[in-house]
Amino acid sequence: MSKLSKDIVQSTSGQPMVRAEGVHKSFGLAHILKGIDLEVNPREVFCLIGPSGSGKSTFLRCINHLEKISAGRLWVDGDLVGYRQKGDKLHELREKEVAAQRRDIGMVFQRFNLFPHMTALENVVEAPIRVKGETRAVARERAQRLLDRVGLGDRTGHYPAQLSGGQQQRVAIARALAMQPKLMLFDEPTSALDPELVGEVLDVMRDLAEDGMTMIVVTHEMGFAREVGDSLVFMDDGVVVESGHPRDVLTNPQHERTQSFLSKVL
Ligand code: ADP
Ligand code: MG
């Protein structure tokens, strides 16, 4: 049993962790998501691939309330997210419900977005203290454990500028985990890194996966998708073109658009 396991919260709802039914998103006249249907099960590593501009980040952002869906239905762990349709009426959640749902979802971006004026440890303890009202002692203890776990136990007093990109991204992962999320969203977490730093971040993600964290990972790292992923979805132009087990989709893509995309990235 690894050290991180007690920081991983498993759902008890018996529902899929994420369920999307006909999810649409428009920005003004730009129709970006055009009816996304998918299901992510608890403990699953769900990889999302597709060309730039296909709507991958927009979809992740809808899950996390950073965007509101325009139509369709989206659930996280059995709870409706954002808007829901009642007849033809769009129904908005209360602010409190949104805040509660967001607390349970961790997100890691391409850019690490650490607070530059705070040490690694301070970055990790900030949200649990501010958002969850945890005591500093409890938050510090968990932060130390999480930073140990991502291999940065000896860097807790360093500021982001004193850390490499790979180290900063590992702090960002520890920071997201500190809120004890039941779902982690990764949006191209290694795309901004120098190639030699990619592996250390993927190793941390692999560890998390082995501990049973439910993760949606937008990535161009096909090796990671193949080795760690349980499901893989190929998105293009706002629709799911193809989905299945990563090995099947990557080695035997059925659709011309998937074949063409993979021929460029593999
Ligand atoms: P991906 O992550 O697959 O590269 P995105 O979800 O970032 O794609 O973007 C999909 C499309 O949505 C792009 O054409 C982008 O310009 C557009 N888009 C994303 N966010 C906004 C926004 N806030 N306002 C207008 N257009 C947006
Ligand atoms: Mg994106």
Image (cartoon, helix red, strand yellow):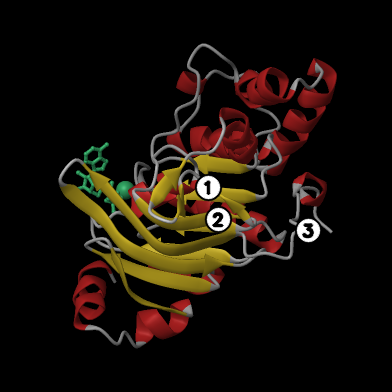
Question: Is the N terminus in the top left, top right, bottom left or bottom right quadrant?
Answer: bottom right
* Quadrant in the picture for residue 35: bottom left
Q: Earlier in the sequence, mark 1 or mark 2?
A: 2
Instruction: Give me the C-alpha separation between circle 1 and circle 2.
Output: 5 Å
Q: Earlier in the sequence, mark 3 or mark 1?
A: 3
Q: Residue at x 53, y 47 (%)?
A: 81
Q: Residue at x 38, y 54 (%)?
A: 88
Above/below status of 57 relative to 254: above
Looking at the image, which is closer to me, 70 or 263? Answer: 70
* SS at mark 3 in the image: loop
- CB under 8 Å between discs 3 and 1: no
Q: Earlier in the sequence, mark 2 or mark 3?
A: 3
Disc sitting over residue 75 in the figure: 2
* SS at mark 2 in the image: strand
Q: Mark 3 = which residue?
A: 12
Q: Mark 1 = which residue?
A: 81
- CB under 8 Å between discs 1 and 2: yes
- Residue 173 in the image: x percent, y percent? 58, 40
Instruction: Residue 28: tell me if it is visible.
Output: yes
